[in-house]
Amino acid sequence: MKIARIRIGDTAHLARIDGDLAHPLDSADWRFDALVDPRTALGTRAPRSAFNEPVLVDSVEMLAPVERPGSVIAIGLNYADHALESGLEPPSAPVTFAKLPQSVIGPGEVIRWDQEQSTEVDYEAELAVVIGTEARDVPVGSALQHVLGYTCCNDVSARDAQFADGQWLRAKSFDTFCPLGPWIVTPDEIADVQNLRIACRVNGEYLQDSTTSQMIFGVDEIISYLSRFITLLPGDVITTGTPVGVGFARTPPIYLSHGDTVEIDIEGIGVLRNTCGPVTSSAGDHAAAQSESD
């Protein structure tokens, strides 16, 4: 199943995507509550039941498939060739960091930054995992049972901030620096999550093109490892690392510019497409706009 959050008029809804149609999810199916923020109208039955008939996907706005994750936990250096292009040895255990949840945007939204704050904004194609059931100290063998589904992520990174700080939180968490989408694909539709083509295109040019088979730590290992220290909750998002080809490691470097179109394309999931542009509002206005849109 492809699970999406869509906007029809002024209201957001959960939908099942089938081809070019968006169908309403059964309002009695509460497995998907973790995808919405209970502070919003989507925490009640009424907005769900108001969407009764299939609509064309092209006629609605696609939203981030998880409205506001409780946590966005990222894994760094999880492809050996990317670690080497970064000048680092492949890690012996997963390298973890966080992206703040307010950095999440959906497909079609604009990745925005002030060029006075960063001139080295980089793309990173990543497979993202959405947790479906609570996981604490789970073994590798049963870790995938806690997965609601998979989506695409662009782990946008301000490299000048990253290297200046010596740690990654600020550089990875600018507002809009965590595009997710276009929807969540449930595990039953993915034959082998460790054998999916993953690519990034900027203005139509392939800059990353690899497969998830190149991960150092598989999805099951990552979930099991994190759950030893952190209780993973429904709606949490884990991004699983990026393959070789990032901008800062190229000669000469390739960084994103305002006006660029970035596409994250993962086999079996879909294409997450965003454009790039300047900041047009304050952080407070951005947060307010997100609240109104969702």
Image: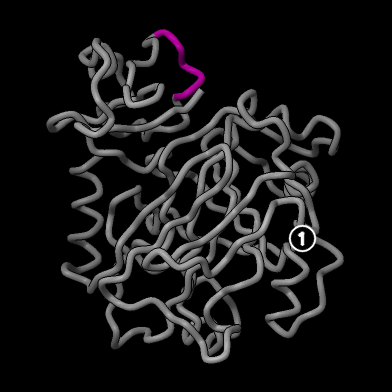
Which image quarter holds the C terminus? top left
Nearest the viewer among 174 and 249 is: 249
Q: Is residue 88 above or below residue 71?
A: below
Relative placement, left or right, of 260 versus 272 is left
Residue 285 inside the magenta-drawn segment:
no
User: Where residue 56 sits in the image (x, y, percent)?
Assistant: 25, 25
* Residue that protrudes farthest toward the left in the picture: 9
User: Where residue 149 sits in the image (x, y, percent)?
Assistant: 58, 33
Relative placement, left or right, of 91 versus 8 is right
Instruction: Give the color scheme: rainbow, by chain, secondary structure or one colour.
Output: one colour
Q: Is residue 265 above or below residue 53?
A: below
Residue identified by numbered label 1:
94
Q: Residue at x 70, y 40 (%)?
A: 193
Q: Secondary structure at mark 1?
A: loop
Nearest the viewer among 116 and 287 is: 116
Q: Quadrant of residue 9?
A: top left
Magenta segment, prevailing SS (helix, strand or loop): helix
User: Which residue type carries mark 1?
Assistant: Pro
Q: Quadrant of residue 45?
A: top left
Q: Residue at x 33, y 26 (%)?
A: 20
Q: Residue at x 37, y 40 (%)?
A: 67
User: Where residue 263 sits in the image (x, y, percent)?
Assistant: 42, 57
The range drawn in magenta is 28-32
Q: Residue at x 18, y 43 (%)?
A: 292
